[in-house]
């Protein structure tokens, strides 16, 4: 979020209560859609160079494979899930932020906030015990599942209770399976997944049903028992590097903003680790809000543009929480009839091309869409609100107006917000937003002008 603002000339201050960057692995997978957005920050190539590419996903039920997804041929320049530990992702982002002259202020914690029509007043507590009161035009809480900002706003975390308990460990596996393939083994209510990691390691994730989580620290014997329950005979853990437990209660906020204060990332939504969507969804929250807030701060857009942040991201969050909850319940099935159906019927259904396309796009977040308020799209035909797939044609920070087989129009003063590019394929005009989603598909320049006037309060001189 700070990068998106700073690279558009907005003065930004970023604080973190932690004394140093995290060294815990935490999130791992970087989705293709996130890599497409990272390309706009010149971070995609450095990330890919550090991570492990995974294109092959295999899921087994009681020893029989019932789902195989192959990401080769995915409609993206990044047809793979990139396994890159959260500390490395944070390091790349921190370095890019420093390129704009902004550093993270450590051991600085927000403890209270109030706001009026013109500004937000924040009380900060520093590591040396001193407090500071500061005023800012806008404030964004990206402060996690236990968000102080959310509590200060009185925003509710809503959703039906659905407790999930996990043991996770970074392990070196001794087994015959290829390293660069994701494997998950489901076995009568037991679940163990193996995410390939750099340096030849795997992130082993073991899910427990409520009330069945072992007490105390995660042990080698506990992890090895999970391996024995699902992995091929003879598989064993050669070494455990890090291990821990965590619990999730799936929740989402009932509103994404109050006045001049916004919530993003885990402060706005918490959901299952199944599918590796959490960190990516938070990053995409930032891309949605960042360019809009910068346009408002820079006097290029009416503040009403900020209302679209919640209108667009709330359905994505709602859909994500619902989808990951359904997936988690599926992997923890223990009813004999249900597990038999998963084992014997699903293998005949999951290879169907239409279902494969839906699953691949959902896994990689390429189906996130703002077209109709559902949060996603299963359609082949592009519409306003969909992700624009040819990202190589887009300006990294402005709107892009693609003019197909015609002379480009003159936009006058608004050229500072819109980059016009002439392309040979297709017909008509395509206006793509700074976050890579289609704003307008039309044959008439008047429609583009009307959108710009309505959305940004500015009109081209065409």
Image (cartoon, helix red, strand yellow):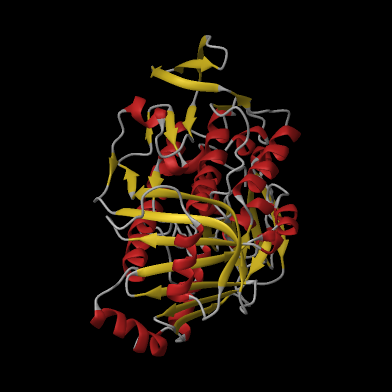
> Quick check: can you spot residue 231?
yes
Of residues 63 and 259, the one drawn nearer to the viewer in this rendering: 63
Residue 79 place in picture, x, y as percent = 63, 70
The quarter of the picture where residue 105 lies is: top right
Residue 217 place in picture, x, y as percent = 45, 48
The quarter of the picture where residue 190 lies is: bottom left
**What's the residue at 50%, 59% (across, down)?**
276
**What's the residue at 63%, 77% (across, down)?**
72
Residue 104 place in picture, x, y as percent = 64, 28
Of residues 176 and 412, the one drawn nearer to the viewer in this rendering: 176
Vertical relation: 185 (above or below) 14: below
Vertical relation: 370 (above or below) 87: below
Vertical relation: 65 (above or below) 215: below
**How many numbered discs sit on the rendered protein?**
0
**What's the residue at 72%, 38% (across, down)?**
95
Q: Quadrant of the N terminus?
A: top right
> Quick check: can you spot residue 78?
no
The quarter of the picture where residue 172 lies is: bottom right
Vertical relation: 457 (above or below) 149: below
Residue 311 place in picture, x, y as percent = 38, 46
Residue at far front of view: 221
Of residues 377 and 78, the one drawn nearer to the viewer in this rendering: 78
């Amino acid at each position: 979020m700070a990068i998106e603002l700073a690279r558009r000339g907005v003065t930004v201050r970023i604080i973190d209560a932690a004394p140093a960057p995290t060294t815990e692995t935490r999130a791992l997978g970087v989705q293709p859609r996130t890599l497409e957005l990272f390309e706009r920050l010149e971070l995609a190539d450095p990330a890919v160079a550090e991570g492990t590419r995974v294109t092959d996903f295999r899921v087994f039920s009681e020893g029989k494979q019932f789902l195989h997804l192959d990401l080769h041929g995915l409609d993206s320049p990044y047809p793979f899930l990139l396994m890159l530990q959260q500390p490395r992702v944070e390091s790349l982002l921190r370095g890019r932020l420093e390129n704009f002259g902004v550093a993270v202020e450590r051991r600085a914690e927000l403890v209270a906030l109030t706001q009026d029509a013109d500004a937000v007043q924040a009380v900060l507590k520093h590591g040396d015990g001193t407090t500071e009161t500061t005023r800012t035009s806008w404030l964004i809480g990206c402060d996690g599942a236990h968000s102080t900002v959310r509590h200060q706003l009185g925003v509710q975390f809503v959703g039906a209770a659905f407790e999930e308990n996990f043991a996770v460990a970074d392990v070196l596996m001794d087994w015959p399976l290829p390293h660069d393939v994701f494997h998950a083994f489901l076995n009568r209510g037991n679940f163990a997944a193996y995410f390939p990691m750099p340096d030849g390691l795997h992130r082993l994730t073991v899910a427990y049903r409520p009330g069945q989580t072992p007490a105390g620290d995660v042990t080698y014997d506990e992890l090895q028992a999970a391996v024995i329950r699902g992995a091929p005979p003879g598989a064993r853990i050669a070494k455990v590097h890090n291990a821990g437990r965590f619990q999730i209660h799936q929740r989402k906020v009932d509103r994404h903003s109050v006045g001049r204060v916004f919530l993003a990332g885990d402060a706005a939504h918490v959901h299952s680790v199944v599918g590796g969507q959490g960190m990516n969804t938070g990053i995409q929250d930032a891309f949605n809000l960042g360019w809009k807030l910068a346009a408002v701060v820079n006097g290029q857009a009416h503040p009403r543009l900020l209302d679209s942040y919640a209108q667009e991201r709330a359905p994505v969050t709602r859909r994500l929480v619902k989808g990951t909850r359904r997936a988690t319940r599926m992997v923890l099935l223990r009813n004999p009839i249900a597990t038999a159906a998963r084992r014997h019927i699903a293998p005949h259904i999951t290879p169907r091309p239409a279902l494969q396309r839906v699953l691949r796009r959902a896994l990689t977040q390429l189906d996130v869409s703002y077209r109709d308020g559902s949060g996603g799209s299963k359609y082949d035909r592009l519409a306003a609100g969909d992700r624009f797939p040819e990202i190589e044609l887009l300006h990294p920070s402005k709107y892009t107006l693609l003019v197909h087989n015609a002379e480009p129009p003159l936009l006058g003063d608004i050229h500072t917000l819109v980059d016009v590019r002439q392309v040979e394929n297709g017909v008509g005009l395509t206006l793509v937003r700074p976050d890579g989603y289609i704003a307008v598909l039309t044959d008439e320049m008047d429609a583009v002008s009307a959108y710009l006037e309505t959305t940004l309060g500015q009109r081209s001189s065409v």
